[in-house]
Amino acid sequence: MNKYTKLFGANAAFAAAMVCLFSPGLVGLSPFAANAAVAAASIAVGVVAVPSFVMMNRALLAEKKEELVRVNEEEAGRKAADLLRRYASSKVLGGIARSATDQGERMEKQSSNFEALVVRRFGRGTLSYGKFMGVIRCAGEALEKGIVRIANKMVIFDEGEYQKLSSGEYKLDDIPDRIQEEKRKLYEENLEDMRSVLEKNEKVLLEVDHLMAEMAEMDCTEQDIDGVADQIRELLGQLEYYTQDG
């Protein structure tokens, strides 16, 4: 919701509440009331209402600045997930935000389940345990970098401007149309890039599912499992964006 729409709605609600409290036909608070308790209550409400009104408007007018997340900073994944949740209800970015959040949650669940399979098969602390858990750890880190990239792109994406450009409303102002059309194309490219990251993340998750299936199949040899693990390593090497700093 637009900041100024929220401001208008909050002030309208505040005004309506004051009318209800001080209207003679409703609650009927008045500092001049014959009843001492009513008069005292009306004064108390007035004293609290003024600073509350000021603080509410200050909070609504304050510009909320969202910071970009660096791939290698502490708790980058959690910070990116928090950003994505803020965009979950967005008309433009909501679908991408929800999908990316789901991918992160699935990877976390898969990592836990995979570790249980590896422990059951090879035991904790063995060379095989370290080898296969290392593959899953790399897959999780790669997925996290992709999610950080998506979250950062959402922070710099002006949804209001994009909707204006997409609706053609920009043709009614005095800014040259060709410049605004180029801006619209840039927004479209950013959206497509986010969807591309989702696709690459999904490929990683698919390979992790494949590895889990091999690990759960007791008839498969460790060499068979190694073959699937190598496929994950190869895939991660092909996803160039995982080497970038979100």
Image (cartoon, rainbow, N blue to C red):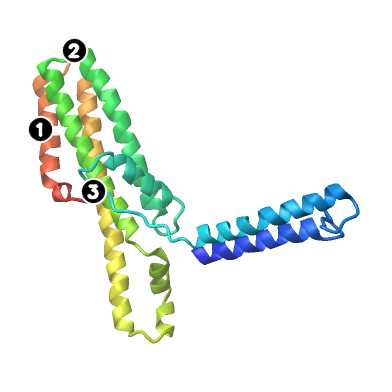
Q: Which mark is residue 177?
A: none
At label 1, counting other C-alpha atoms closer than 10 Å, the crowd grade (few under 14, some 14-19, many 20 or more) is few
Residue at (19%, 36%) from the top-left corner?
139
Q: Residue under circle 2? A: 123
At label 3, counting other C-alpha atoms closer than 10 Å, the crowd grade (few under 14, some 14-19, many 20 or more) is some
Q: Looking at the picture, does residue 152 appear above or below residue 114?
A: below
Q: Nearer the viewer, mark 1 or mark 2?
A: 2
Q: Looking at the picture, does residue 244 appear above or below residue 165?
A: above
Q: Position of residue 36 (x, y in %)?
A: 86, 49
Query: Which quadrant of the figure has residue 28?
Result: bottom right
Q: Nearer the viewer, mark 1 or mark 3?
A: 3
Q: Residue under circle 3? A: 70
Label 1 secondary element: helix
Q: Position of residue 35 (x, y in %)?
A: 89, 50
Residue at (29%, 25%) from the top-left corner?
112
CA gap, disc 2 to disc 3?
A: 35 Å
Residue at (35%, 84%) from the top-left corner?
175
Depth order, front residue of 118/17: 17
At label 2, counting other C-alpha atoms closer than 10 Å, the crowd grade (few under 14, some 14-19, many 20 or more) is some
Can residue 224 be seen in the rendering of this structure? Answer: yes
Left-right relation of 39 to 69: right
Q: Residue under circle 1? A: 230
Query: Which quadrant of the figure has residue 105?
Result: top left
Residue at (22%, 39%) from the top-left corner?
204
Left-right relation of 229 to 46: left
Q: Nearer the viewer, mark 2 or mark 3?
A: 3
Amino acid bearing label 2: Gly
Label 3 secondary element: loop
Amino acid bearing label 1: Asp
